[in-house]
Amino acid sequence: MPVMSKPLVVDNVVKRFGRGDGQVVALDRICFEVDHGDFVAVMGASGSGKSTLLHLMAGLTQADGGHVLVNGQDLTAMNDKRLTLFRREHIGLVFQQFNLIPTLSAAENVALPLRFAGVAEKTIQERVATMLGKLGLGSRAKHRPDALSGGEQQRVAIGRALITNPAVVLADEPTGNLDSANSDAICRVLRELNETDNVTIVMVTHEPSVGMYARRAVFIRDGQLCRTVDTTDVADAAALGVMYQEVLSGGGSAAPTHDARDDEVDRPVSETADV
Amino acid sequence: MVILRLAIANLKRTKMRAALTIGAVAAAVSLVVVITSAFASLQQVAYSLLDEYYSAVDVAVAPTNNADVIHMDLVRAMEKDDRVNEVRVSLEVSSLMVDNKGNRLAPWPVKLRGLRDPAQHDAGRRALASGHWFEMPADANSVVIGEGVAAGMKLKVGDMVGLPRLEGGPVMFKVIGIVGKPDVLWIELPSVYMPLKELQDWSGYGDTASLLEIDLKPEVDFEAFVKDWETRTDLAGVPLKFKTELRHKGAFDQAIVGVRILSYLGGAIAMLAAAFIIFSTLAMGVAERSRLLGMLRAIGAVKVQVGQLVVIEGMTLSMVGAGLGVALGWYWTWLLAHHYPDLFIAGAVLSWGGVIFSVSGSLVAALAASLIPAVSATGVSALEAMTVVARPSRAKTIAVCAISGLLLMSIDHIIVFLPHMEQEVRLWTHLCLGLPTLMFGMFLLTPAIVLAVEPLLAPIIARLLFIQPALLRQQLSGGLWRTAGTVSALTVGLAALVVIQVHGRSLLGGWKLPTEFPDLVLFSPLGVDPKAMDAVESVPGVKRDSVLPIALVSPQLGTNVITLFGMMQRPNATSMFGVDVDKALGADDPPRDPMVGLEFKQGDLVTARRRLKEERSVIITEEFYKLKGIGVGDKIKINTTLNGEVEYTVVGVIRSIGADMIARTFNLEAEMENWTIGSMLTSLENVRRDFGITKLHLFMVNLDTADDKGAITKRVREAVGEKFGLLAADARRLKHGIDEGLTRLIHMLSTVALAAIAVASLGVINTIMASVRSRQWQLGVLRSIGLTRGSMLRIVLSEAILIGLIASAKGIAVGMILSNIGNRMSEVVAGYDPPWVIPVTPLIVGVSITLAVTLFASIIPAVQVSRADTLNLLKAGRSSA
């Protein structure tokens, strides 16, 4: 029986910004693995390194050390073109600002990655219709972004991220531009996709209420992973918020927080805690 | 396909910007189309006239020297040739027309055409406006005049007109018919038709003709016929030139090639401005959409696809603009033809060459303009999708561009100023490599110029407009590339204006008559024996023994007047002046002052004048010397009419006196056929011996300057004009007239540059609108904390003023650099090193127009933003930056 690669492995990744005395270590030997069908929330304060981690996982920036593997392929060893083509096929991205093209309809926005890949038009139409239906946007297919609510726009963006059936969806503060009602709606969509379609999701957020929709919450502080929480063990968002505040205030342990799933994978060599 | 959809989607999003850019391209293309179509329309007229005059003529025969005539023995021999169907004979001379008292009917001479049988000629077959054609012998002493002549001299059928005679009163002729002729040409060729015999008798040419139009039988080989008859000077009495229809058109095409090139170049300047506007539009599109482009990269668009997106946007703008431009150009041409039917007698003729040139040119321009934005777009990181505010241009990029720009600019200077380079190589390398790299280099330098100048000018403008200087600190550098594009677009027009004015005036400025130069220039359309000119000396006020006869020949064909400005072709001919050496250059025994003061660059006056009388020798002008690299003692091979190729020895090199310019003023036909730049001086005897010149057309005369010069000139004109049909003019006034004419030409050419500035104004609107759009949030914040609407208006206007000032400074600088190169190239191409002449007024006008255009273009966006609601501005958010 063939061994399937994990959708995402972050192995001992280091990322620095600046030079000399002004150098800042944004990520310090991070190790991180995500299984198929997992839904992980990466939480941390501004400047903690959570967004940088997401950029590295998406191959949008290069690490100064370590490796990032998606579906077993090392992103750090790829050149720009290969990385772009790989990302097109294996990684879905959801942005805080939605980043929809204002002059294209919802359906056309969702179809973009397939069109870049040169997929047959008939296939595109079928897949886009299915995706919009699944996201509850079937009736809004021909609407342009300015005719959609913020929540609908983000759902279109999620559809665009999912249309290529990626190995992992990386969402950067997907609710950051939404009100609480729309925020909840988007989180429910993500959770539903995770539960029903087994979509693997890694989401960066600083909202405990959003983090609660994930299966696991990973806290990051000063470029280091410092705690992992199984959200099913947490009573509610308020409880997760308390844990989050502990981490922010330095109260949380920088030592590894054990996760049952850790035993199922080979551990990368790291001085810091694994998830 | 998806890239095309994205490109079109973006253009739809920025409708106004796209519309302005399309408008700029359309304006530029329409300018090319209308200029070239107008030229094509006029060319069509000329071709139809050529067809009319020569298509029915298999072979035309004329004397090699315009002053000569062909003996009718040749006609009679030709008529016996079995291959000849018909020989149409005419004699052409020019003269003034007078009334029965000898008073001129008009100040201009007419072309007298003596026809053996009007029915044979096209003119004779044409319907008359009134009257009838002459039939011999009943209609002896009759003429048929052209409509232009009838209008100009207020003549009608039945009136009498006269031709002046040397002795006695004028010979009178009755007007029996008026023939229509296209108005466009009558100014050049006001014609009077008369029986051949009458004209032969009046002119004293006897049994001769000046033009034979031969109709050959079918199947006859024209060229073989020409070859058989080309050498029959024994019958004709003079050397002959044979022309077939093909040769006529070829000569005509050669004569107008300069004008055609200019018509294309004029439009090309406007298209260059439009290209910069496309660049500006694309550059601001890339800058504004960095997040969106980053998103495309993040979701899987490869670099090439992002680059293609920008290129396709540029090409789409260009194609739509070109399509509209062609339609607009055609409409303008139609309007011109409708309003000026006299000039467009062939109707509106669309220049397909102009259409192809403008459409392909605009596409190439769009492609070139989109390259840098496309490369810039491919460099957008996928991370940009995660950022909120667009990144400013990097200082390193600007520095690299500036250094590259300087290096590129130096290429043309190396080409132009590098010694020991073959002239042809230098000219074509300059045109094909030097100029494009120079223009591109100047563009790359623009962002650095903006960065350098902005901190200097912005505080001054802020104070002048009562704005806090801090608010203008990054007015232009905030959108550096779009500013660079707009500045460059404006620069094109202003630089073109500076080049046309400075280079043109410099070329004119180099032409100075010597201190010693005859006062009066006389021109005889008929040509007279030099001795007949003794009569001039009897006119009161004319100095004794001071009529200088001059024979003028052009041994080889050259290019036309446009060469003076365009230097598009090297002259391969020279004007040779044959003069009475003693009169022109003075003598020792008996002592005599020279009539023409020559400034010798090589050799000396005494030796030169001695040797001119002794041998086949010439004094050459400095241009000729520079061009051919020959000096005193060198031999020049000259193709002569009578003796073939002979060697002349150079005995002096002088500064040009521009006598050839004056000589050609009297004879447009000769000018069109034989324009040269360098000239040489030899003895009258040499010209007579080698070119067979007997009658002379040009004389120069000294006046007794104690009397009123104007009055004497008038007396000479009246006295001799009536006798010989002579035209007389004050040499210095003549020069002044030529100067003025050429200055008018410079002004006319300058309108093209102004059109380019007008096109560029669309780019200014674009830039200001983009700038306002990108700073809505910032302006909203300023409004919310107390900035008044008036202040906001002034902030936006200040940006336009800054752009206008930088464009003006750069335009003047670029224009001066190009003028310097132009002056140098005129030395390389024509051997003429003009002095620097900087006409201040036109340059001030150019700068004022540039500033006015930028200010005017910014008014609408400035007013719009000043009226905008503060909340709406704030809603635009920082992401609009």
Image (spheres, coloured by chain):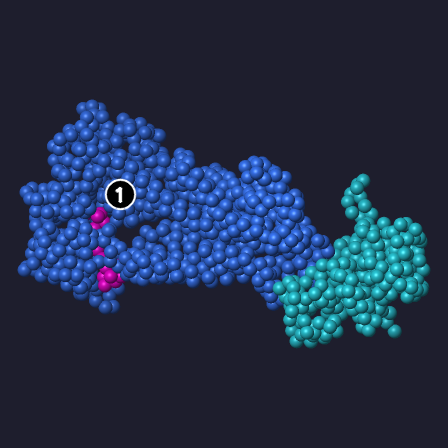
Three-letter residue code for mark 1? Thr
Q: In this rendering, does residue B646 appear at all?
A: no
Instruction: Report the front residue among B694 and A132.
Output: A132
Secondary structure type for disc 1: helix
Please count the marks in the image: 1
Quick check: A131 left or right of B311? right
Q: Residue at x 60, y 46 (%)?
A: B480
Instruction: Report the front residue among B468 and B97.
Output: B468
**In the image, which lettered chain appears blue?**
B
Quick check: B665 left or right of A12? left
Q: Residue at x 13, y 33 (%)?
A: B539
**In the image, which lettered chain appears cyan?**
A
In x, y percent, where is residue B671?
Answer: 28, 46
Q: Residue at x 70, y 74 (%)?
A: A138
- Near mark 1 (Cα within 10 A), the count class, few <14, some 14-19 or many ≥20, is some
Where is mark 1, residue-wise?
A: B665
Q: Could you tell me which quadrant the N terminus of chain B lies in?
A: bottom right
The magenta span reads B50-68
Q: Is residue B283 magenta?
A: no
In x, y percent, where is residue B538?
Answer: 12, 32
Q: Quadrant of residue B158?
A: bottom left
Q: Residue at x 69, y 60 (%)?
A: A99
Q: In this rendering, does residue A16 appear at all?
A: yes
Instruction: Report the front residue among A96 and B63.
Output: A96
In x, y percent, where is residue B375?
Answer: 62, 54
Mark 1 — on which chain does it sit?
B
Quick check: B839 left or right of B80? right
Instruction: Report the front residue among A205 and A20.
Output: A205
In x, y percent, where is residue B839?
Answer: 40, 37
